[in-house]
Structure formats: C-alpha cells, structure tokens
Amino acid sequence: MRTQAEQLLGARVTGSDGKVVGTVEQVFRDDVDGTPAWARIRSGKTGRFVPLGNSQVTADGLSVPFDAQKITGGPNIEAGQHMSAAQAEELSRYYGLTVPAQQTPGQQVPSQQQMPAEEAAGAPSDQDWLVRQEERLQIGKETFETGRIRLHKYVDVEPIEQAVHTFHEEYDIERIPVTAEERLSGNIGEGEQEIVLYEERAVLRKEIVPVERVRLRTKRVEEDKTVRDEIRRERIEIEPNQARSDFQR
C-alpha cells in the first residue's frame, strides 16, 4: 500500500462482509521500507490490528480483505509508537501471512573482514552518536453515541365552539272577528285543528383529515475543534568542561 499514513488516520474501516469495524486510530510502518504495514482500529472501547497489504482506500474509507469477526477476534496487543518484531510475527500468524525468518541463536555475526569497508576502517558506529527524538502528535477520530431522540404521537382533546343559525316553529292563535257580510251558518258542535311544528337542529359529524408528515432524521453538522496536548522533544547542547574553564581564568 503506497498510501500515506496520514491519509488513513480517522478513516472508517469496512470488512469484507460489508460491516463497519471502526476507525483507524494509529498506523505502524514497516521497519524495512517504511511503508504503512499495520493499522490499529478503534471499535468502541477496544483496539484491534489489521494488515494493510491488500487493503484499498475508497470514497467511504478503508476496505480490508478480512471480515469484522476476524478483525475483532484478533490478538490484544499493546503497542506504543513502534511495533516489535514479535508482535508483528504474532499478528502475521493470526492473519495467515508470511512470517519473515528470524535470526537463530546459533547464527554467527560477520567477522571484521566481512563488515562494510567504512566500519572496518574505523568509521563511527551507532554508539558514537546521540539520537535526538521527539514525539509526534497523531490525531484520530471516533464515533460515539451522544443521545437518542424519539417521536411519540399523543391525542389531545380540545373543546371548540361554533355558532350555527337555526330556526324552530312555535304556535300562535289568530282570532279574526266575522263580519255581518261573512255570516256563516253552521251547527253547534265540537271541532279540532292540528298543525305540525318544525325546528332545525345542529348535527355534528367528525372526519379524520391528515394535516402533515413528521419524522426524525439525522443532520450532519461539520465543525472544527481544537485539541490540546503536550509533546516532548529532546534537545542536545554542548556543555563546556568546567574544570578547564576555571584553569583558563
């Protein structure tokens, strides 16, 4: 994999079964050629390692040729800023990768004649150098659940009033005197008249009408945050010989 290690930090890792395992928390380089060799994946509160040899960087993150169960069931290895040869061998055996041959205890160290010319000539060895080291800050990202929102539909009863114009009939007795010209002849006896009274009444009818659709959805908000920490850096300075300085005075 020729991808830079910085491009992998925080990438979402998807297994061969299509399941998201977690995000890349740390990348370990190969001691020989310096290429990214292993990635530590943060999944919840656990961290597991996966080889990067046959992995692919996609638009969705990092795709690895191992399923989620294989990755999460891997060895629990504690590695700081550097992975030891024994740790790399244990992971390689777990994933079925080729394990590099280790130097056997009986293997001989090259003699003076077999050493490179500059070492045989008295060139500075590793013990003649001071190695200055410094810490580099690597920032990864994890996804945590921050809360849950639930929609619940309730039924509220609301009293309403509305004026309705209606009518009703009432009876009234109308008496009109009969004039001399309208003298009517008839017999004395009982009689009756019946009328029907009507009225309007308000009739209530209810219907259910949909008024709106409501649903929950997530909205991704991009923001910039500043992380703060401290890193250590070694410093090498010349310290004068105190005894010789006093002598020169």
Image (cartoon, rainbow, N blue to C red):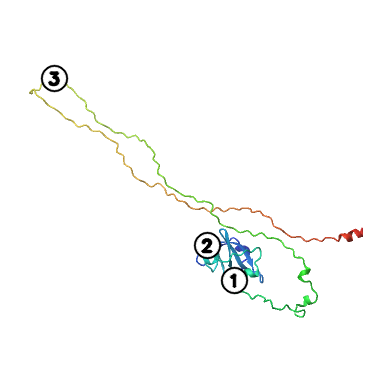
Amino acid type at mark 1: Ser
Q: Residue at x 89, y 59 (%)?
A: 245
Residue 23 in the image: x percent, y percent? 57, 61
Task: Give the structural element (helix, strand or loop) at label 3.
Answer: loop
Q: Along the line of sight, which residue is nearer the eye, 215 or 164?
A: 215
Q: Residue at x 52, y 62 (%)?
A: 20
Disc 1 target residue: 92
Precedes in sequence: disc 2 or disc 1: 2
Residue 2 image-quadrant placement = bottom right
Closer to us: mark 2 or mark 1?
1
Disc 2 target residue: 20
Closer to us: mark 3 or mark 2?
2
- Left or right side of 35 for 19: left
Precedes in sequence: disc 3 or disc 1: 1
Q: Could you tell me which quadrant the N terminus lies in?
A: bottom right
Disc 3 target residue: 179
How far apart are the two marked residues, 2 and 1, measured between alpha carbons?
22 Å
How many marks the image carries: the answer is 3
Precedes in sequence: disc 3 or disc 2: 2
How far apart are the two marked residues, 3 and 1, measured between alpha carbons?
131 Å
